[in-house]
Amino acid sequence: MDSTTAKILDGKALAARMREQIRLEAAELTQKHGRAPGLAVILVGDDPASHVYVKNKKSGCEKTGIHSISHELPAETTQQHLLGLISELNQDPKVDGILVQLPVPAHINPETIIEAIDPGKDVDGFHPYNVGRLTARKPALRSCTPYGCMKLLEETGLDLHGKECVIVGASNIVGRPMALELLLAGATVTVCHRFTRNLQAHIERAEIIIAAAGKQGLIKGEWIRPGAVVIDVGIHRREDGSLTGDVEFESASQHAGWITPVPGGVGPMTITMLLANTLQAFRKHLGES
Ligand SMILES: NC(=O)C1=CN([C@@H]2O[C@H](COP(=O)(O)OP(=O)(O)OC[C@H]3O[C@@H](n4cnc5c(N)ncnc54)[C@H](OP(=O)(O)O)[C@@H]3O)[C@@H](O)[C@H]2O)C=CC1
Ligand SMILES: Nc1nc(=O)c2c([nH]1)NC[C@@H]1CN(c3ccc(C(=O)N[C@@H](CCC(=O)O)C(=O)O)cc3)C=[N+]21
């Protein structure tokens, strides 16, 4: 009965469709108000993995008519200097969204940086104001990766009410906001983390699995309940340069009902939700929503 092969949740295709909508809406507002949406991206130092993200984000902006402004700062940049730049961008009326690429170098406190961003420009949805809004069931700007995972789950057509969801990972940027999104959608949510005993037992009873531990192949295909939905957030580069996730894709596909590939699953959706958030912030700044 496990001989089925999972349907692929194609993040790349969904991202392309959503980007087309974003492009049309951005063009209409740009025409009407005489300026394009603006996204400022700050990169401090050069974490190699960050470059992929920054590159994909730039191309996403270009394709959707969002004006992107990059600030690439040296690794030695002081926290004070970074706070000064954020303050300028907070006040710049051409800037609708501000994103500081994480991780930042060790001498900079990421929480201080995130909290310095105007919550109305916090297109990552990381500011405690935006996290609080999601907690209070009145989401404003939502974290891009969990928001993208929710859009992928929508593609399955499943009703999330009462579904047994297991999230692996409890970080501020993925696991925790993911739990809030699923709770808002009426699911029953378990969050696993480093201190979780018997991860396998949790996975085995899950109808929906969100894998975001950042551990290559942590989740074995044999653990997947037949028909379950598997959303793999993890991204790891193999020695041959290819990418893989936190889930053993081949074996998991033999059990799951739906599964996201890596690459081409959650990654393109994260970028797309960033563009969607930038458009949402733009609309708000224009008084259109
Ligand atoms: N596709 C995309 O768009 C994105 C992909 N990513 C990828 O997703 C992964 C996770 O990212 P991020 O959340 O930033 O990572 P973090 O390292 O910040 O968080 C990982 C979380 O997983 C938990 N964890 C680690 N090992 C285990 C384990 N063996 N069992 C259960 N839980 C475990 C950690 O627990 P503890 O808190 O106790 O340490 C932590 O809560 C990475 O591979 C990253 O590259 C991230 C963002 C976007
Ligand atoms: N402030 C901040 N916000 C973030 O959202 C953020 C961050 N910092 N730091 C790093 C993580 C990671 N992340 C990715 C997003 C998309 C892809 C992506 O597009 N992945 C492609 C693969 C790209 C390739 O070909 O290498 C895919 O999965 O198909 C990857 C990684 C966002 N993050």
Image (spheres, rainbow, N blue to C red):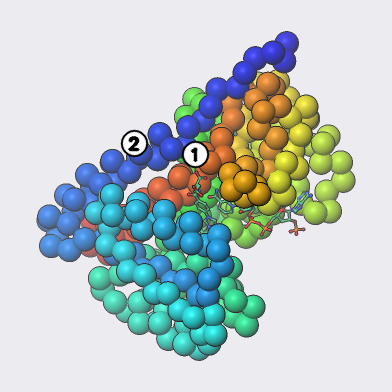
Q: Split into 4 quadrants, where in the image is the C terminus?
A: bottom left
Give the image location of residue 184, x and y in percent.
56, 43
Tell me how far mark 2 sits from mark 1, CA to CA. Answer: 14 Å
Identify which residue, 75 or 41, lies in the foreground.
Answer: 75
Assign a secondary structure to mark 1: loop
Image check: 92 left or right of 198?
left
Vertical placement of residue 176 versus 187, above or below: below
Identified by mark 2, the residue type is Arg
Can you give x and y, in whole percent of width and height, for residue 244 in the image?
A: 62, 42
What residue is shown at x 72% (from left), y 49% (from top)?
215
Q: Label 1: which residue?
A: 264
Quarter of the picture containing the N terminus is top right
Disc 1 residue lies near ligand 2 with CB under 8 A: yes
Q: Eyeballing the image, is 107 above or below 65?
A: below
Q: Identify the residue shown where x is 46% and y is 44%.
A: 269
Which residue, given by chain and number where applicable, does mark 2 sit on?
A: 17
